[in-house]
Image (cartoon, rainbow, N blue to C red):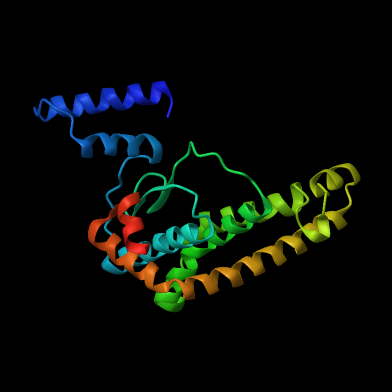
Amino acid sequence: MSGADLEKVHRETVLQALSKNTGKIGQSTLLEEINILKYGAKRTLDKCAKMLAETAFHEAGHAVISKVLMPERIIEQISIVPREQALGMVAYNREQEIDYTKAFWFSQTCVALAGRAAQVKQFGDEGLDTGASSDLRQAMWSAWNPVAKYGMHPDSYNLDTTVLHEWSGDVYFQSQTEKLIKEWLDEATLKTDQLVDQYWEQISKVAQALLEEEVLSEAQFKSLIE
């Protein structure tokens, strides 16, 4: 967070304390102002028990598979509280440096797909909904970058096919890239489904905890999966 962000959080928390006549700033108030700045204000939605459970398993799937594939990535919190930017979220430390290797892109693809995979495992076809739209976009992005832009696929090694297509205008490069991206996504889908099955006990524990607490801190999450 920048200095301006911190100043804004401080100002808002002081105003909250003054409006409530508490004379002090509570930790919960401070954390909420940080969440508002990062992820948007809370939304009031009339969500039924099934929708809450779907969101809980969805976010639990993301979180657990992320920790399995990328244990070094810091998860600050997991939430099923609806906000302006999402119905639920797994929030990472945005200041952590990332090495964008082929392994990272593949893991990121799997993590993006893990929410829907967990939701479908728990609820069957009833778990297939539009809530995964942004995840599918993320999965496509995580496949497109290594395949089309950074030449990490064996069949496009050292080729930036976006440049080739731009220079030649040949649709061949576009169709070949789409084929390789589909292969990448198919492999990631298979891997994700296997991991969700393997770590289902941890996913279920995290989902149940989310239904009870709504928000899990990094420490709470670790205690559930270790």
Image location (x, y in percent) of residue 174: 81, 55
- Judging depth in this view, the residue of 157 and 48 nearest the camera is 157
Count the numbered circles shown. Answer: 0
Left or right of residue 67, residue 145 in this image: right
Q: Residue at x 71, y 52 (%)?
A: 146
Image location (x, y in percent) of residue 48: 27, 65
Q: Please identify the residue farthest to the front as the structure is shown.
A: 226
Q: Residue at x 77, y 64 (%)?
A: 179
Image location (x, y in percent) of residue 198: 48, 74
Residue 226 sits above or below residue 31 on the image: below
Q: Residue at x 40, y 21 (%)?
A: 4
Instruction: Answer yes or no: is residue 175 visible.
Output: no
Left or right of residue 136, residue 42 in this image: left
Image location (x, y in percent) of residue 186: 66, 69
Q: Can you tell which quarter of the image residue 139 is in?
A: bottom right
- Judging depth in this view, the residue of 43 and 28 nearest the camera is 28
